[in-house]
């Protein structure tokens, strides 16, 4: 395969990933069966992967996918009707062109946002709803979702399968929920958007540091939710967190796609307009009085973004904010971040002591980030040999190639200084 065709194939793949939740939402809205619609969309994606490289991308790729998936759904419905020996099959024999044009239908509703709320239906447990939404709306693989939840891939596969079955049995209709239903589902919706954004901003596996289509879609959907509930502090906090974090995206990687850590980034590349927007959002949210986990994380991101230089960062304020966050959530990654902040304020020994506690948390057992943070703090403490061991251990555990290369490079530089 030539370099040009390899790039074209990658463009097709990115386009298909971006369109998948939109097409799934349109098909579910039209035909109502979530599980069958997902199968039909997958078949349409396979057809596109075969057809588009040979014949070119159609003028309306989204509409093309909806039509192909719609034909698969009609085949499925006809087969179901025949199996049940119903005479109503005639009703389903309308020509595809009689269906509402995808773009006209989409003008009336954001199918992806409706799909997001449908996947977070209370018929599902919170973990199952989030897992299903990450799969259907975020387009994440089962392995990526399992990594986000810190559970085995097989466990996550079973959870997603059960969620699909529960959606089918519940008979839930497609569409935006009522105000009461929206409130009931909002926590799960925010959590899934947070995870989609994180996977886009810091991809857990593969050759790319970032998947911009995922983080951008998460921000777009968060803006849509914010428009629905503009007075909800946590919705504003999550949107602020995404905007403030994404503002640093251009500085996070070098010319070869290599990872550049926060303290080494060229802050002139940070998006100042996005930072101003994020700071305004979180400031207004915090002023309402009811503080939540997303608002606190956004406040931490704002402190980082407002520092003109890495050495100007107000680590004491960040440590205090992480202290509040630890009291509100049992997430071990929060404790890991708290350990980093403690090391920056009180010295590496304070951070290392907190890491010893985390070693006993089975959710982080063998996780590369724990080893990577330990390596960094050991390096700051002057224990070169121990730091080398942990940098190499972290590199061997991560499935992200840019992360692995960064950790190997840190180890190599540390080894060279001691030679």
Image (spheres, rainbow, N blue to C red):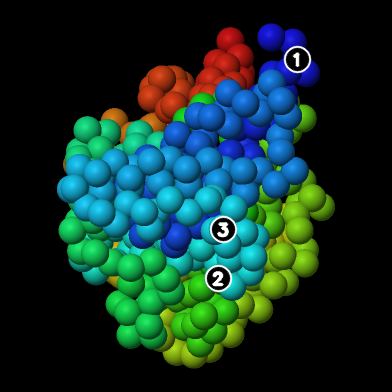
The residue identified by callout 2 is 109
- Mark nearer the N terminus (3 vs 2): 3
* Residue 385 relative to residue 278: left or right: left
* Distance between the alpha carbons at the discs numbered 3 and 2: 19 Å
| Quarter occupied by residue 405 | top right
* Residue 151 relative to residue 130: left or right: left
Residue 127 pos. (x, y %): 25, 55
Q: Residue at x 54, y 76 (%)?
A: 226
Q: Residues within 10 Å of mark 1 (few under 14, many from 20)?
A: few
The residue identified by callout 3 is 98
Q: Which circle marks residue 97 in the picture?
A: none
Q: Nearer the viewer, mark 3 or mark 2?
A: 3
* Residue 138 relative to residue 314: left or right: left
- Mark nearer the N terminus (3 vs 1): 1
Residue 100 pos. (x, y %): 58, 62
* Distance between the alpha carbons at the discs numbered 3 and 1: 42 Å
The residue identified by callout 1 is 3
Q: Residue at x 42, y 71 (%)?
A: 175
- Residue 89 vs residue 107, the one in the foreground: 89
How many numbered circles does the render carry? Answer: 3
Q: Is residue 243 above or below residue 76?
A: below
Residue 266 pos. (x, y %): 77, 46
Q: Nearer the viewer, mark 3 or mark 1?
A: 3
Judged from the image, the secondary structure of the residue bearing numbered disc 3 is: helix
* Distance between the alpha carbons at the discs numbered 2 and 1: 40 Å
- Residue 351 vs residue 63, the one in the foreground: 63
Q: Residues within 10 Å of mark 3 (few under 14, many from 20)?
A: few
Q: Residues within 10 Å of mark 2 (few under 14, many from 20)?
A: few
């Amino acid at each position: 395969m030539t370099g040009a065709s390899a790039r074209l194939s990658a463009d097709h793949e990115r386009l298909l990933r971006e369109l998948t939740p939109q097409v799934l939402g349109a098909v579910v809205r039209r035909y109502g069966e979530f599980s069958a619609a997902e199968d039909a969309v997958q078949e349409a994606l396979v057809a596109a992967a075969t057809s588009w490289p040979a014949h070119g991308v159609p003028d309306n790729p989204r509409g093309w996918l909806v039509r192909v998936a719609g034909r698969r759904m009609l085949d499925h419905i006809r087969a179901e009707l025949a199996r049940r020996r119903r005479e109503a099959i005639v009703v389903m024999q309308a020509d595809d062109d009689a269906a509402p044009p995808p773009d006209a239908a989409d003008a009336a509703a954001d199918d992806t946002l409706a799909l997001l709320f449908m996947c977070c239906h209370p018929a599902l447990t919170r973990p199952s709803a989030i897992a299903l939404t990450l799969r259907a709306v975020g387009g994440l693989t089962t392995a990526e979702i399992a990594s986000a939840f810190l559970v085995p891939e097989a466990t996550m596969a079973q959870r997603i399968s059960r969620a699909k079955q529960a959606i089918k049995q519940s008979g839930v209709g497609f569409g935006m929920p009522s105000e009461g239903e929206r409130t009931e589902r909002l926590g799960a919706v925010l959590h899934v958007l947070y995870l989609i954004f994180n996977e886009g901003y810091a991809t857990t596996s593969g050759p790319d540091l970032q998947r911009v289509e995922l983080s951008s879609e998460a921000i777009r959907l968060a803006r849509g939710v914010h428009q629905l509930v503009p007075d909800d502090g946590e919705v504003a906090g999550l949107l602020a967190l995404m905007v403030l974090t994404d503002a640093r995206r251009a500085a996070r990687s070098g010319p070869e796609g290599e990872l550049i850590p926060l303290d080494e980034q060229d802050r002139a590349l940070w998006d100042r307009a996005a930072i101003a927007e994020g700071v305004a959002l979180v400031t207004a949210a915090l002023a309402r009085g009811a503080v939540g986990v997303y608002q606190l994380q956004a406040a931490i991101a704002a402190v980082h973004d407002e520092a003109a230089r890495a050495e100007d960062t107000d680590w004491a304020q960040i440590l205090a904010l992480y202290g509040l966050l630890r009291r509100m959530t049992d997430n071990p990654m929060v404790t890991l971040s708290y350990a980093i902040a403690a090391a920056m304020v009180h010295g590496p020994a304070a951070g290392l002591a907190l890491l010893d506690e985390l070693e006993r948390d089975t959710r982080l057992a063998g996780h590369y980030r724990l080893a990577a943070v330990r390596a960094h703090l050991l390096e700051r403490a002057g224990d070169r040999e121990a730091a080398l061991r942990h940098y190499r251990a972290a590199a061997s555990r991560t499935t992200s190639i840019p992360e692995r290369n960064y950790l190997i490079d840190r180890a190599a530089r540390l080894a060279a200084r001691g030679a």
